[in-house]
Each structure stands twice: as structure tokens, then as C-alpha cells.
Image: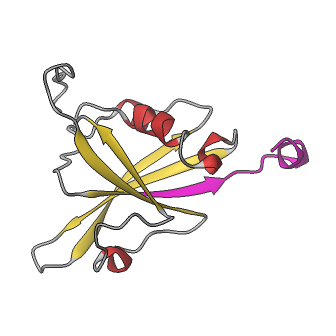
């Protein structure tokens, strides 16, 4: 996998459109007729192809309150054009708000992100016990 670092002082960032929902998936079909207008379920981030998913998750905390919860799991996936002219989904993995995992250190570039791809995000909440329920 490509782990080259980008000189962020000399390279212009790209626009990453993130579509999100809590406890449910974003279907590629729901994005097919989207325009450039900003909807409530969309966050636009400026970043670079060497951004890790932990870095992206941290940026999303500024815009989506549910990503700040200690029991949140952020399930990421690309939504990108396919050969038939539609959109398809490619799963990436989960970033947990507390525990570090393998996906945290993956970059957009490593996963073959292409400018124009969308990033889908499903926020799920885990409840380990009643103590977690009341500490939110």
C-alpha cells in the first residue's frame, strides 16, 4: 500500500463530501440525484489523500455531535461511480471513538480514493451495560 506523505503546505486539499446517518446505512441510490446543495446529512471537509481515517473521524467531531459520544462506532464506506453509470458501495471499516484499530491508520490514498468519490458514514452506538446508557 502507498504510504507516501503529501507536503500539505504545497499541495491543495481536496473536497471530501461525507454523507452520514445514525443507526442506518446510506444507500448509493439516495445519492444518485444529489446536486451541489448542502443537506443536513452531509458534511464537507477539506483534506488530503494522506489523511487517516482517525484524522477524518476527529474532523467529523466538530460537525456531527454523535461522533463525540464515547460509545460511537463510525462505519465508513466509499460510494463511487461504477461501470454501469450508477453508484456502488465499497466498505472500508470501523473507527471506534475510544479504541484504536486497524482502520484508524489507513489513508484515503491507500484505499484508492479518487476525487469525486463520496464517503459514507453510519454512526452506531454500543451499549456495554446500563452504566454506558446513563453516561451519554
Q: Which residue corresponds to the image point at 50% horizontal and 34% vertical from the top-left?
A: 58
Q: Is residue 27 left or right of residue 126?
A: left
Residue 85: x and y, percent? 13, 79
- In which quadrant of the rendered image does the N terminus lie? top left
Choose top left, top right, bottom left or bottom right for residue 131.
top right
Q: Which residue corresponds to the image point at 85% horizontal and 49% vertical from the top-left?
A: 133
Choose top left, top right, bottom left or bottom right for residue 61.
top right
Q: Is residue 101 left or right of residue 126?
A: left
- Asked if the stretch drawn in magenta spans residue 39, the answer is no
Q: Is residue 70 left or right of residue 129?
A: left
Query: In the image, is residue 40 above or below residue 105?
Result: below
- Asked if the stretch drawn in magenta spans residue 131, the answer is yes
Residue 89: x and y, percent? 31, 66
Q: Which residue corresponds to the image point at 49% horizontal and 64% vertical from the top-left?
A: 41
- In which quadrant of the rendered image does the C terminus lie? top right
Between 80 and 90, the residue placed more toward the observer is 80
Q: Which residue corresponds to the image point at 53% horizontal and 29% vertical from the top-left?
A: 100
Display colour scheme: secondary structure
Q: Which residues are magenta?
A: 120-136
Query: In the image, is residue 118 above or below residue 53?
Result: below
Amino acid at each position: 500500500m502507498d504510504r507516501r506523505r503529501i507536503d500539505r503546505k504545497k499541495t491543495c486539499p481536496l473536497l471530501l463530501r461525507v454523507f452520514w446517518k445514525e443507526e442506518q446505512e446510506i444507500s448509493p441510490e439516495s445519492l444518485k440525484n444529489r446536486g451541489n446543495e448542502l443537506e443536513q446529512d452531509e458534511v464537507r471537509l477539506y483534506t488530503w489523500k494522506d489523511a487517516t481515517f482517525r484524522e477524518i473521524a476527529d474532523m467529523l467531531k466538530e460537525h456531527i455531535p454523535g461522533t463525540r459520544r464515547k460509545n460511537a462506532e463510525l462505519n465508513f464506506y466509499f460510494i463511487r461511480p461504477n461501470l454501469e453509470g450508477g453508484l456502488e458501495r465499497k466498505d472500508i471499516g470501523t473507527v471506534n471513538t475510544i479504541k484504536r484499530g486497524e482502520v484508524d491508520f489507513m489513508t484515503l490514498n491507500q484505499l484508492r480514493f479518487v476525487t469525486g468519490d463520496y464517503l459514507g458514514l453510519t454512526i452506531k452506538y454500543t451499549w456495554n451495560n446500563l452504566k454506558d446508557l446513563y453516561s451519554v
